């Protein structure tokens, strides 16, 4: 395979003044707040170069946090990998223990989503009562470490509901099969639901029945053995992941070239397509086998794609894929460049295959190749730009002459 090298040199960028005061996403003059380009929970320590302070409005920043990032951190392998970063930060060993998983996991044996306790104390799988779509209650409970009998547990849950001694966690991001449930966490009861109506339905049903007689008991210990040997399901969405990758590219491009560059109308189709998806996000399930990893061939779309709804392009467009040499050294690597009239980027996060994204077609010049890398092992964040000096450089970007078709990606 023919390989061609481009030398690149470390550099630094400071966010440029945003004279228009427009948000780079919604193009409106709204109050700004600090936008972390890569979620700060995915870095050992915060990095100045990972922030936009005057380019993203509070409303758009909240959209990305709640709709995309929060979902990945709760349900997906990214939530699992994030815990390894947390362990490095707190000087603990990197663990593959079952405990370090997202807040909700799907247990195949029981066909139910289960809330996970991330804290250092308390049950990994706390006792919880579900209201199923058949309008019946299920009790999920581990006998081995319990201080109470089942009768005592039913009495305690009933008292908490009758006295409204619980808080409510509500999120529309909960999986469609994630039933409302009440669970005990550090001595406090929490009611989890997708909406106020769903939470109220749970409480009304609880009041109207004898929960002890009606609940179907799901007892863990006698069914599936050791927790560490459980087969659990993570959620995944390629569309959400492409949206996340695109968001990262666009905000780094803003840091590097300035808001005046990304506010160009040539990017309107891109920003509109991401903020207003025309169809629902896909919702995949990925089996994780303890100590063996994720039972899936790939997590990402293999070809060049565009999230834009109206990008006019040649469906047989041939675009070289630029990636970093020895990129396995980095936890994240992003390369941004222009090929013909296309603004292109490759994005690699953790162990996920590259996203190869076209974010716009424009005649505006992008005269250099830019690369962003981060290693959580060393907690080192770097930005590079292409150099003309072939004797003084820090890294090589490689062009393995891979030529994939550019396709429309239906978000």
Image: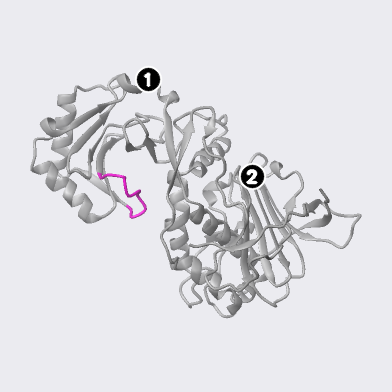
Percent position of residue 244, x then y:
53, 56
Q: Nearer the viewer, residue 236 or 253?
A: 236
Q: Is residue 284 above or below residue 84?
A: below
Q: Is residue 69 above or below residue 274?
A: above
Q: Please give the range of residues in magenta.
A: 171-180
Q: Is residue 263 above or below residue 14?
A: below
Q: Nearer the viewer, residue 125 or 324?
A: 324
Q: CA distance from mark 1 to mark 2?
A: 34 Å
In the picture, the disc for residue 236 is none
Q: Residue at x 32, y 50 (%)?
A: 176
In the picture, the disc for residue 225 is 1
Q: Is residue 27 above or below residue 235?
A: below
Give residue 44's quadrant in the image. Answer: top right
| Residue 228 in view (yes/no) | yes
Q: Secondary structure at mark 2?
A: loop
Going from N to C along the chain, the mark reached first, 1 or 2, is: 1
The residue at which mark 2 appears reads as 331
């Amino acid at each position: 395979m023919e390989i061609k090298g481009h030398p690149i040199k470390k550099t630094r960028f400071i966010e440029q003044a945003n004279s228009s005061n427009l948000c780079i996403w919604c193009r409106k003059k709204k109050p700004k707040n600090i936008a972390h380009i890569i979620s700060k929970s995915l870095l050992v320590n915060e990095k100045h170069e990972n922030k936009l302070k005057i380019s993203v409005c509070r409303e758009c920043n909240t959209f990305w946090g709640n709709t995309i990032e929060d979902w990945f951190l709760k349900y997906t392998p990214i939530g699992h990998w994030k815990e390894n970063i947390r362990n490095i930060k707190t000087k603990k060993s990197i663990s593959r223990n079952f405990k370090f998983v997202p807040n909700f996991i799907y247990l195949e044996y029981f066909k139910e989503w289960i809330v996970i306790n991330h804290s250092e104390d308390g049950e990994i799988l706390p006792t919880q009562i579900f209201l199923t779509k058949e309008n019946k209650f299920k009790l999920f409970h581990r006998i081995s470490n319990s201080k109470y009998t089942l009768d005592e547990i039913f009495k305690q849950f009933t008292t908490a509901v009758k006295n409204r001694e619980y808080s409510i966690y509500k999120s529309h991001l909960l999986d469609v099969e994630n039933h409302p449930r009440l669970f005990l966490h550090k001595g406090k009861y929490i009611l989890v639901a997708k909406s106020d109506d769903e939470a109220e339905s749970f409480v009304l049903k609880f009041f109207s029945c004898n929960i002890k007689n009606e609940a179907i008991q799901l007892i863990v210990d006698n069914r599936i053995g050791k927790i560490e040997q459980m087969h659990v399901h993570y959620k995944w969405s390629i569309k959400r992941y492409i949206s996340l990758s695109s968001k990262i590219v666009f905000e780094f491009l803003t840091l590097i070239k300035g808001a005046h560059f990304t506010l160009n109308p040539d990017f309107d189709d891109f920003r509109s397509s991401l903020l207003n998806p025309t169809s629902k996000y896909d919702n995949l399930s990925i089996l994780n086998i303890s100590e063996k990893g994720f039972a899936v061939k790939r997590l990402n779309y293999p070809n060049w794609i565009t999230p834009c709804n109206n990008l006019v392009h040649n469906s047989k467009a041939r675009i070289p894929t630029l990636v970093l040499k020895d990129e396995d050294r980095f936890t994240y690597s992003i390369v941004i460049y222009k090929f013909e009239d296309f603004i292109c980027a490759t994005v690699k996060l953790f162990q996920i295959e590259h996203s190869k994204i076209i974010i716009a077609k424009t005649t505006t010049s992008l005269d250099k190749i830019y690369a962003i890398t981060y290693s959580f092992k060393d907690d080192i964040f770097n930005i590079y730009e292409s150099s003309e000096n072939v004797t003084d450089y820090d890294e090589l970007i490689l062009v393995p002459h891979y030529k994939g078709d550019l396709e429309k990606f239906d978000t």
